[in-house]
Image (cartoon, rainbow, N blue to C red):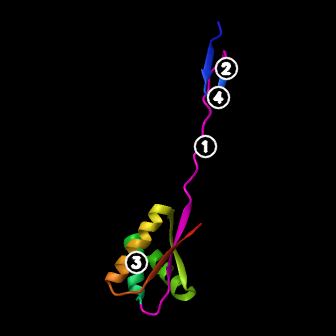
Amino acid sequence: MASDFSRSSGEQKGGVATIPRTKTRRPTQFKVMLHNDDFTTMEFVIDVLMRYFEKDATEATRIMLLVHYTGCGLAGIYPREVAETKVSEVSEYAGANGFPLRCSMERE
């Protein structure tokens, strides 16, 4: 005997009733960038990358040199709220230590 199933997607007779899946969207990602200046020390930039972006010493040094030679470097890619927090924390930490290190975020 066939059963009638009433679902939000319509009626189905017999067989297996299925509920359509809704596809979840990935949150928009943002790049967190560090910018070069003439006052922030290389050691401080490495410290920031290790402390706030969980980079090891080798990766932090590579990114710091990229910032130094090209003017900016990618510190990480995060959802909006995380990127905003990282920018805020880095800016506050730099200011508290007397450095004008600029950190920004941009949509990926």
Q: CA distance from mark 3 to mark 1?
A: 37 Å
* Residue at left offset 48%, top offset 82%: 64
Q: Is residue 49 magenta?
A: no
- Three-letter amino acid code at the position of disc 1: Lys
- Three-letter amino acid code at the position of disc 4: Ser
Q: CA distance from mark 2 to mark 4?
A: 9 Å
Res. 54 visible in picture: no
Give coordinates of residue 91: x percent, y percent: 40, 77
Q: Earlier in the sequence, mark 4 or mark 1?
A: 4
Badge 2 element: strand
Give coordinates of residue 40: x percent, y percent: 41, 88
Relative height, residue 15 to residue 80 (above, below): above
Q: CA distance from mark 4 to mark 3?
A: 50 Å
Q: Residues within 10 Å of mark 3 (few under 14, many from 20)?
A: some
Per the image, the residue denoted by label 3 is: 91
Which mark is drawn over residue 12? Answer: 2
- Three-letter amino acid code at the position of disc 3: Ser
Which mark is drawn over residue 67? Answer: none
- Three-letter amino acid code at the position of disc 2: Gln
Quarter the C terminus occupies: bottom right
Per the image, the residue denoted by label 1 is: 23
* Residue at left offset 53%, top offset 78%: 73
Quarter of the rendering containing residue 44 = bottom left
Q: CA distance from mark 1 to mark 2?
A: 22 Å
Give coordinates of residue 1: x percent, y percent: 64, 6
Badge 3 element: helix
Q: Which contiguous range is marked in magenta?
A: 12-39
Which of the two residues, 87 or 72, is positioned nearer the viewer here? 87
Is there CB contact under 8 Å for labels 4 and 3?
A: no
**Numbered disc total:** 4
